[in-house]
Amino acid sequence: MGYDDYLAEEPMVVTAALTGGVHGKEANPNLPETPAEIGRAAAEAEAAGASVVHLHARRPNGERSFETARFQEIDDAVRRHTDDVIIQHSTGGTSAPDDVRHQPLRTDPPPEMASLDMGPLNRYDRLTSENTRALVDSLHAEMVDRGIKPELEVFNDGHLNEVHGLLDRRDLADPVYATLIFGPGTLTPPTPANFLNAIANLPDGALFNTLGFGRHQLPFAAMGVLFGGHVRVGLEDNVYYERGELAESNARLVERVVRVADELGRPVASTAEARTVLGLE
Amino acid sequence: MTCPYLEYRRGDEHASFDRERAYCTATASFVQPMRADVCNDRYDLDHERHCEIYRAHAEVE
C-alpha cells in the first residue's frame, strides 16, 4: 500500500475505537462504558462513516472486563443499534492471564475481527503487557478456528519483526491487516519518517491501519489517507477534539476524519466495501 | 488485600458519576480503569510491587 493506492482512490476503512480499557469517564465523561452507551456510540460512529467498531468490555463501574458474557452484552447492544457494522474485539490486557485473554473470542457469534497484540509494551512505571509469542500463537489459532480475522497491532518497529515472524510460523489469511501505532512510551515515536519506515517494513501485500495517540490522532490519520492506508480514530486513543477541548463523542472524531478524506479525494469504504477490502467475505 | 489508598466514590469536587469509581486518596483523583486492577490486586498484580504511586507514598509516610 502506498501513495499509488491514494491516487487510485482505493476505499479507506474507518475504524472507531469507542471505549478502550485504559482510561474511562474520569478522562472524558462522554466516553461510552456500558453496553447501552457503547451500542449507541457504535450507531453514531457507523452513521458518521465508520465501518468497523473496536470494542473493549468494562464492568459496570468502568473497570476492565475480559468476560465473554460482558462482550456478548456489548455485541448484542451494538447489533441492536447498528445496521451492519463490523465488530472487532480487543484481546489486549495488561497482566491478565492467558486464558482470560481468550475470552473475548468466545461470543456467539464470534466477532468478525479481533486484535492481536504483536509484542510487549510498558504500562505506567512498573507494568508490562507481555504478549508473548506463545500467547500470540494461541490467540491466532483460536481466531482461525472461529473464523475471526486478526488485526495485528504493531506498537513499535520491533513488532514489525514479530509480524514477519508470525507469518513464518503460521498461515495468515490474505490480506494481512496491521495497525501501525504511534505515540509516547513504548509506541513508535510519532514522526512522518517513522510512519514511512513502518509502511516500508510491512510484509508484501499487507494492508495497514493508522493509529496516532492523543494529539497525533488526526495528523497520522491524514497521513494514512494520503499513503493508501486505513484509519482508526476514537475516544480509546484520544479524548480531545482539539487542544483543551474534550471530544463530545466518538462520532465527532469519525466525522472529522471522513471530512479530511473527502477533501483529499479518498473515498470512505461502506461496510460492504470494508468487508471486501479486509477479506471478511 | 487491596491498596489502602483505594476508595470507591461517586464524585469529588471536580467530577461526579452515576456509579462509584476507583479513587486514589494518595493522589486525590479518580483512577484509570486499567490502574484499578493494580489497586485491587487482581490477577497477579500487587499494589506494593506494581504501583509507583503507592510506593512513593508508602516511603513518605
Image (spheres, grey):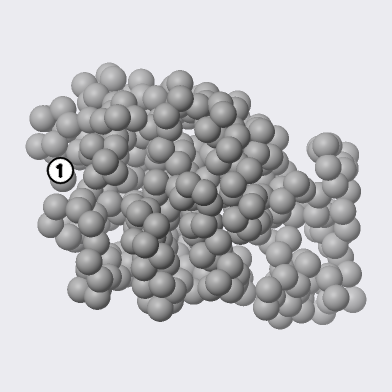
Point out residue A56 in the picture as x, y percentages from the top left corner.
56, 49
Residue under the point 36% across and 24% down = A258
Nearer to us in this view, A111 or A160: A111
Residue A54: where, in percent of width, then height? 47, 44
Q: Is residue A142 left or right of residue A38?
A: left
The answer, for residue B53, to whether it is visible in the render is: no
- Judged from the image, the secondary structure of the residue bearing numbered disc 1 is loop
Among the 4 quarters of the image, the one containing residue A247 = top right
Mark 1, other Cα within 10 Å: few <14 / some 14–19 / many ≥20: some
Q: Is residue A163 above or below residue A130?
A: above
Q: Quadrant of residue B38?
A: bottom right
Question: Viewed as shown, does residue A145 lie left or right of A121?
Answer: left
Residue A60 location (% of width, % of height): 75, 46
Dot 1 amino acid type: Gly
In this view, A43 is above or below A64: above
> Could you tell me which residue is drawn at 24 percent across and 44 percent down?
A279
Location of the C terminus of chain A by quadrant is top left
Q: Residue at x 69, y 61 (%)?
A: B35
